[in-house]
Image (cartoon, helix red, strand yellow):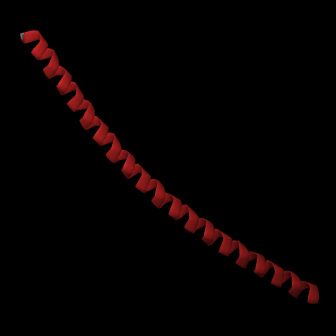
Amino acid sequence: MFWPMLAIALGFAGLAVLGVLAVKVFVEAQRLAGQVAATTQRINRAAEDLERAATTLADTGEALRQQSAAS
């Protein structure tokens, strides 16, 4: 009677450990998802800034070209 009870107790302990580890993995996955979302927003913001800077540079280059053509 001792061995079956020990096997059941160890099985329950094993399931409890797996449950704790599953919760830890879930929490870390949620944290990683939040970091990915924040990084994606930063990348999008940087891309928009780069696009604005490129447009300004292109406008400046066009104005210089027209100015030198007029001279």
Above or below, 56 relative to 47: below
**Left or right of 7: which side holds 64?**
right
Residue located at (27% from left, 31% from top) = 18
Residue located at (13% from left, 12% from top) = 4
Q: How far across and down, in percent of the image, does residue 40 sit?
A: 52, 59
- Point out the image quarter for the N terminus: top left
**Left or right of 56: which side holds 41?**
left
The answer to whether residue 15 of the structure is visible from this angle is: yes
Residue located at (29% from left, 41% from top) = 24
Q: How far across and down, in percent of the image, does residue 45 sit?
A: 56, 68
User: Which is nearer the eye, 49 or 68?
Assistant: 49
Task: Write down the quadrant of residue 54 in the picture.
Answer: bottom right
- Point out the image quarter for the C terminus: bottom right
**Left or right of 60: which side holds 48?**
left
Task: Write down the quadrant of residue 63 in the picture.
Answer: bottom right
User: Which is nearer the eye, 12 or 18?
Assistant: 12
User: Which is nearer the eye, 15 or 63?
Assistant: 15
Above or below, 66 relative to 2: below
Q: How far across and down, in percent of the image, does residue 9 sit?
A: 13, 22
